[in-house]
Amino acid sequence: MPLIILDRDGVLNEDSDAYVKSVDEWIPVAGSAEAVGRLCKAGYRIAVATNQSGLARGYFSQSDLDAMHTKMTALAAAEGGEFAHIAWCPHGPDDHCDCRKPLPGLIHQIEQALDTSAAGAWMVGDSIRDLQAGLAAGCKPALLRTGKGAASEARLADITALADTPVFDNLAAFADHVLAQA
């Protein structure tokens, strides 16, 4: 089964500069749950790799994060989708972990959990650091314009390794592209 790795905030749900801190603040991007369902039904394994430094900063608790992921999982399931694994980095930017994107540690966690290689898998995100983490793990990057994606798109041409990254309006448009290639 081919693997697709998704960032969370700005890809599956609306992002917030004030952090998404509760299940009520976790608002799906229109069409994202349906896109996960369509990809799963077509035989793709979907995993999530998300930085969640709000945990380290004390903005929300692990139970809050669990509730957000329960909501995310339920919305995808209602569309026939599922997440094969959800990996999150609970660390702050100064914690010097190996899992905070742009480092590839979350992708390596996904590889270990699913007993597969992410080499050649899609890494779909809305930020440069999402794409850099994917490249570091041998993934094909794809940028979405949702979340911080529009601002990130303006920077792609300045980063040689990312200059040819395909850009899509949202996860539904990415899914349309992948499914048309299958």
Image (cartoon, helix red, strand yellow):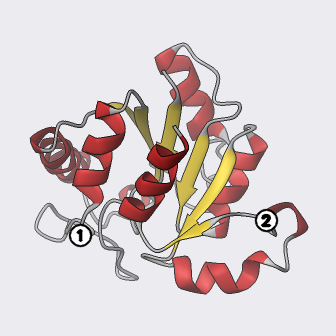
| 105 lies above or below 16 | above
- Residue 22: quadrant of the picture: bottom left
Residue at the outermost right position:
160
Does the rendering let one see residue 84?
yes
Residue at x 59%, y 44% (from the top left corner): 122
Identify the residue position indicated by label 1 in the image.
Answer: 30
- Residue 160: quadrant of the picture: bottom right
Residue at x 60%, y 69% (from the top left corner): 167
Identify the residue position indicated by label 2 in the image.
Answer: 164
Residue 117 location, x and y as percent?
64, 22
| Cα distance in 3D space between marks 2 and 1 | 26 Å
Q: Amino acid at mark 1?
A: Ala
Secondary structure, mark 1, is: loop
Residue at x 50%, y 55% (from the top left corner): 177
Mark 1 Cα shell of 10 Å, populated few (<14), some (14-19), many (≥20):
some
| 110 lies above or below 147 | above
Does the rendering let one see residue 96?
no
Q: Earlier in the sequence, mark 2 or mark 1?
A: 1
150, 136: nearer the viewer: 150
Residue 64 location, x and y as percent?
18, 53
Q: Amino acid at mark 2?
A: Asp
Residue at the outermost top position:
115
Residue 114 location, x and y as percent?
48, 18
**Residue 67 in the figure: left or right of residue 157:** left
47, 106: nearer the viewer: 47
Residue 171 location, x and y as percent?
40, 61
Residue at x 20%, y 53% (from the top left corner): 68
**Residue 182 in the figure: left or right of residue 47:** right
Secondary structure, mark 2, is: loop
